[in-house]
Image: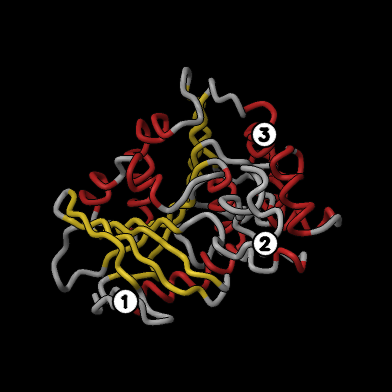
Amino acid sequence: MAALPTSRPGELELLSKNKMFGGENLRLRHQSTTLGCPMTFSIYLPPSTPSSKIPVLYWLSGLTCTDENFIIKSGAQRAAAAHCIALVAPDTSPRGLNIEGESDSYDFGVGAGFYLNATNEKWKNWRMYDYVVKELPKVLSNYFARLDTSQASIFGHSMGGHGALTIYLKNTDKYKSVSAFAPIVNPINCPWGQKAFSNYLGPTKSDWEEYDATCLIKKNNKVSTPILIDQGEDDKFLVEQLLPCNFEEACKAVGVPLNLRMQPGYDHSYFFIATFIDDHIAHHAKFLKST
């Protein structure tokens, strides 16, 4: 790893470092050219030999979260260490821009980037899609010589599950596999998605479809890698916001392999995520280590 400076523009600032399962959790900050503001991300580097090339598994978090929620609450590091996979968790939106209305509600603006590129001029800095797909991998490659960002997979929760699925389906050449916990799979048909998309993308609903996994799967029907989704049956957002059956029907219609696991008694929380996180790490390890 290159030396981490304290505050030089365009470079990484080390905010914290903690040893865990023989590896290290790092929290870092840099000036994002894509978003026009400082951005933090967390990374878990598993124990490895100096000559090892480590694959990368990106985690996208949900509404109101930061880069820390997953790293602190999921318990994913144990399995990541066992499989020698790096975990990378970016923040969920730009912060500190002081755009009018950016913090008025939990489901739009700060903490609610929806992993898209906004086209509404007011929200022009909300370009989390480009940040995750383009800028962040370059930052990782520049500073962490042992990371192999060409061997990457992606997963996430809720809004982040939506982000993981849509980013994967639009970039199957960049990611080996995808999975999600309680994802928003059909945002054009749920209140969260309709609010975010109308503000970020404007009124043209065909533009919304470019960030809707259920719509995208119909266009990208050549996906052969199985998609894993865990969904709690006691999730209070299941019926109105998440709509997993819509995605399941779309996958069946085009023959895309989907393992949708409905989990009795589980809700939308990180208790649910921590319960099944090892399965997801193992799922991605199969594809990250297959080439």
Q: Position of residue 11 (x, y in %)?
A: 38, 79
Position of residue 80 in the picture relative to residue 137 (left or right): left
Q: Secondary structure at mark 3?
A: helix
The residues bearing labels 3 and 1 have C-alpha atoms spaced at a distance of: 38 Å
Residue 248 or residue 256, whichever sits in front? 248
Q: Determine if residue 19 is in view.
A: yes
Ranked by sequence position, the earlier of labels 3 and 1 is 1
Instruction: Name the quarter where the N terminus is drawn.
Output: bottom left
Location of residue 150 in the rendering, given as x and y in whole percent from the top left corner: 40, 70
Mark 3 lies on residue = 241
Query: Residue beneath label 2, please?
Result: 99
Location of mark 1 (residue): 143
Mark closest to the chain's N terminus, 1 or 2: 2
In front: mark 3 or mark 2? 2
Residue 186 image position (x, y, % from top left): 69, 42
Q: Amino acid at mark 3?
A: Gln
**Residue at (62, 28) in percent of width and height:** 238
As helix, strand or loop, the secondary structure at mark 2 comes to loop
- Mark 3 touching mark 1, by CB under 8 A? no
Q: Amino acid at mark 1?
A: Tyr
Report how many numbered discs are placed on residues in the image. 3
Mark 3 nearby-residue class (10 Å; few <14, some 14–19, many ≥20): many
User: Callout 2, which amino acid?
Assistant: Ile
The location of residue 7, given as percent across then percent down, is: 35, 77
Identify the residue shown where x is 60% and y is 65%. Answer: 97
- On the question of residue 289 being in view, the answer is no
Q: Label 2 near label 3: C-beta < 8 Å?
A: no
Q: Residue at x 25, y 79 (%)?
A: 2
